[in-house]
Amino acid sequence: MHKKYKRVFSINNDLGFRNYTVRDIIDLKGKRKLTQVRVTTTEEASAAEEAGIDLILTGPGPNLPAIRKAAAKTFMTVGVPFIQNPSKREATKKAFDIIEAGADSLMCQNWNLDWMKHLNKFRIPFQSHVGFIPRRTTWIGGIRSFGKTASEAMELYKDVKDIENTGAWGIEVELVPQNILAIITQETSLITISIGSGNAADAQFLFAEDILGQSEIKFPRHAKKYKNFDKLLNNLQKDRVNAFKEFKLDVKKKIFPTNKHSISIDKKELSNFKNFLHKNNSTI
Amino acid sequence: MLKKYKKIYSLAHQAGYRNYTVRDLLELKGKKKLTQINVVSANEAAAAEIAGIDLLITGADNLKAIREAAPNTFLTCGIKYTEHESKESIAKKCFELVELGVDSIHTNSWNINFIKYISEFNIPLQGHVGFVPMMSTWTGGVKPVGKTSREAIKIFKDIKELEKIGCWAVEVECVPKDVLAEMTQQTKMLTVSIGSGIKGDVQFLFAEDILGYHHSSTVTPRHAKSYCNFNKIYNNMQKERIDAFQKFQLDVETNKFPSIRHSIIAKKEEVNKFKKLLVNLKNGNK
């Protein structure tokens, strides 16, 4: 086996192994295309690690420690929700909790830029988000691409530079024209992470559920489906129903349980027990 | 559609539909063999309801989702004794579960006085005798209980105690078939057999055993029957996940993804304008 992982101290001071440090990722800009996958389950996380996906993104939910364990050696970024943490102090506290759960980096989506600068003072690696940002769609008039005109592209460029100035290492760029992101990728020291923004970025990002064909929403145009998990999961549910039906029928027809599934008792012990029951009944 | 469910009020006074009331179940004793399944996920619960399984049992952790997934099936919920040090505490927990829509509570290895106390609220209770995993240190480990007349008599007394309290059912685990046959006749309660042979009023299995799905540490118990091999299916699905992620990785490394089809293109003139604006911006900054 080639040397795939390096020894690291995590940002909560745990000794372990990782595919990359944040320094490695920054040094790879322009040299190598990276992948990032957003996972929500331990199965997705361990599959991503085994497949050699470069970067994992996930949420701060209760299964974060299990996801970290399932993909212990992959550089993992975790979202820090700002809505539930409405001050610099609270957001920082939440960030620390997530770091203790094993995050290598944080996703500061929609964060106040001041808070991001504050986080950088702790030397904590984080990435952010520009272009089409789902929570901010009301400002751009709905679900659409962003940056198709020169003035929007300039706005985008300024957003990227603002985030670069906070000390972030990476930036998710969503639904931006390919030829605009190509220019921006050259103009920024940030690792650009494309989702629906073409192939000129430093990293390509997709949701595990889209890759697996297990989307709850209508399949996004920019994603590529490699499997049909919707169908697999439907079949699994049919298998469950059939198995339970067979069990019910077996019980109804007295096919289950057989002696093979049952425990026997010595004849003498049984008759002793029956004698006891008989006496017991006559005393009532 | 045949009239499968009847209108009921739940213990929390919610109007709804169920396959059985506790009264129906008691009246079915000796007339119909029933099934009970232990479920841990909403998918298992939904599948069990569609399959027409008579009774469901589950733990408190995922109860809300499970009740929603199988709203019309008689549902019993277990409570661990170690989480409740007083009868007041266990009553509070019972009320919470009742509010979430359970039809009955499983008392497992509770203090018998706690069981009596909860029965005073008329909450239907299912007890547990024979091999009780949490108390198996008293019966000598993972092995059948009731193979001697002495042990069988002890189980009989346990059953009579639960009956006296007013439990509607009792899970009888890993007890000899012939012993359960006697007991089923000797009690008004429904006997729920798991590994205790065919003479129980109810046959009980875990969904994971029926589906052939096990966490790495366990194997299918001798008394269970697997109707599917979910271990194999889950392993294959995991291979599919790995394969999909590997293909994505390769597509990116070889520049095959994303293609133009997956991308958005800005007009040339806008791109040129953008380039000029960038130059101006940089000159302005100098």
Image (spheres, rainbow, N blue to C red):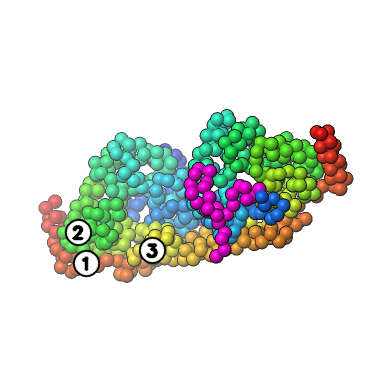
Dot 1 falls on a residue whose secondary structure is loop
Dot 2 falls on a residue whose secondary structure is helix
Indicate the amino acid at tag 3: Val
Q: Quadrant of residue B245?
A: bottom right
State the residue in front, A272 or A27: A27
Q: Are marks 2 and 1 in contact (CB under 8 Å)?
A: yes
Q: The disc numbered 3 marks a residue on which chain?
A: B
Number of marks in the rendered image: 3
Residue at 51% over, 62% down: B234
Indicate the amino acid at tag 1: Ile
How crowded is the residue under tag 1: few (<14 C-alpha within 10 Å), some, or many (20+)?
some
Circle number at residue A254: none
Q: Which residue is mark 2?
A: B152
State the residue in front, B266 or B219: B266
Q: Which residues are magenta?
A: A1-26
Residue A152 part of the magenta segment:
no
Q: The disc numbered 2 marks a residue on which chain?
A: B
Residue A265: x percent and y percent?
A: 21, 67
Kindly report the distance in space between the C-alpha atoms of the residues bearing marks 2 and 1: 10 Å
Q: Which residue is mark 3?
A: B219
Q: Which residue is mark 1?
A: A265
Kindly report the distance in space between the C-alpha atoms of the residues bearing marks 2 and 3: 28 Å
Residue A136 seen by the camera: no
Residue A16 part of the magenta segment:
yes
